Image (spheres, grey):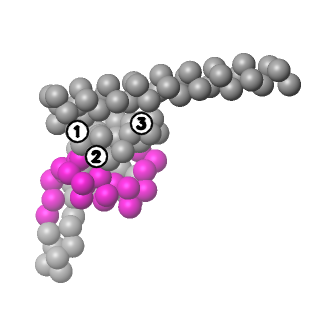
Amino acid sequence: MKIKEVISKTGLTDRAIRLYIEYGLVMPENQKSYNGRNHYNFTQEDVDCFEQIAMLRKADFSLEQIKKLKSGGESAREVLLEYLSAKQESVVMGQRIVEALKDF
């Protein structure tokens, strides 16, 4: 499938899709044209991967963190532990704010 179909299915922009490819998060089949332009052929697996990346980005993961998650192993574990710690801190801060607002 072509990039326009991926845009339609995922809601991502052309720029985001190309950035994720450039960053090595998705590696679709690629053919260079005579003028040097890339022509990508995306699979449903690629679309699924883009959707997963979009979800992780909405959850505030950086591209570097996503790359580590995709690589698996100890680096993925470290990313997840850092993320969970940050979210726990955020919850605690949110609870403190709610308690402080109750006084008003």
Looking at the rendered image, the quarter that the C terminus falls into is top right
Residue nearest the observer in this picture, 98 or 38:
98
Does the rendering let one see residue 5?
no
**Residue located beneath label 2 in the image:** 64
Whether residue 40 appears in magenta in the rendering, the answer is no
Residue 68's disc is: 1
* Residue 51 horizontal side relative to residue 73, left or right: right
Q: Quadrant of residue 4?
A: bottom left
**Residue located beneath label 3 in the image:** 55
Residue 47 vertical position relative to residue 15 in the rendered view, above or below: above
Q: How far is the residue under mark 2 from the one under mark 3?
A: 15 Å
Does the rendering let one see residue 65?
yes
Q: Amino acid at mark 1?
A: Lys
Residue at the outermost bottom position: 35
Q: Residue at x 34, y 40 (%)?
A: 53
**Label 3 element class:** helix
